[in-house]
Image (tube, grey):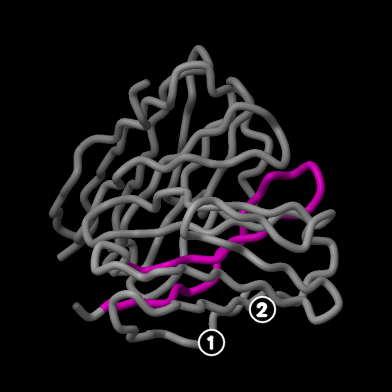
Amino acid sequence: EAGVVQSPRYKIIEKKQPVAFWCNPISGHNTLYWYRQNLGQGPELLIRYENEEAVDDSQLPKDRFSAERLKGVDSTLKIQPAELGDSAVYLCASSRVYSGNTIYFGEGSWLTVV
Amino acid sequence: DQQVKQNSPSLSVQEGRISILNCDYTNSMFDYFLWYKKYPAEGPTFLISISSIKDKNEDGRFTVFLNKSAKHLSLHIVPSQPGDSAVYFCAASAGATNKLIFGTGTLLAVQP
């Protein structure tokens, strides 16, 4: 079974530029998550989808971040414009059912804003 | 407000000995706990989990213990191997949300 696939793996951009990350979850997983991990910290949830619906986006900085999950499968996370403080690893994850189940992570998209 | 705390940023253990990684939490509503392992430049990999209805769960060399009264869980690795060297994250969730709250991680170094 293929794991969670993310692209690009690495991205370096100048501040104020836009950037987008793509994620394809594990087949059959209806819940998709975007996490952000800063250096020396644990991952923090940005947004969670149940199928196409964003059921928890309370931690998503909506002034510059947006996400979508069309057709309830793959997802895109966008930052526009990027700031220096956005440098982090953006992790996509998926799980099969709504609660009490293991979340599986992709390898992450490493963003550096210069 | 750090709801999940891993107070030891690093741990060094000799190969073949036991590794004990600790995690404390403050939210009494947490009812599901997980440990993830992370190698450099990779995403976190699920290792083992435990529900709050249990106090112990084993999977091969890995055992997780949960002490609900102390709001404490620990991961035991026996015997430790050099390939276990990684950052270990403790995570917890409450109820039906499946929203994982992570600790800051403990870097385990297993010396040959």
Q: Do labels 2 and 1 share a chain?
A: yes
Front in this rendered view, residue B83 or B22: B83
Disc 1 target residue: B7
Q: Does the magenta stretch include residue B74?
A: no
Magenta residues (range): B86-110
Determine whether label 2 and label 1 are within 8 Å by CB. Answer: yes
Q: Residue B14 in the image: state x and y as whole percent.
A: 30, 83
Mark 1 crowdedness (10 Å alpha carbons): few <14, some 14-19, many ≥20 = some
Label 2 secondary element: strand
What residue is drawn where x is 47% and y is 18%?
A: A73
Disc 2 target residue: B24
Q: Using the rendered view, name the quadrant where residue B31 is placed.
A: bottom right
Asked if residue B43 is positioned above or below residue A71 in the image, the reply reads below
Left or right of B101, for residue A26: left
Mark found first going from the N terminus, 2 or 1: 1
Label 1 secondary element: loop
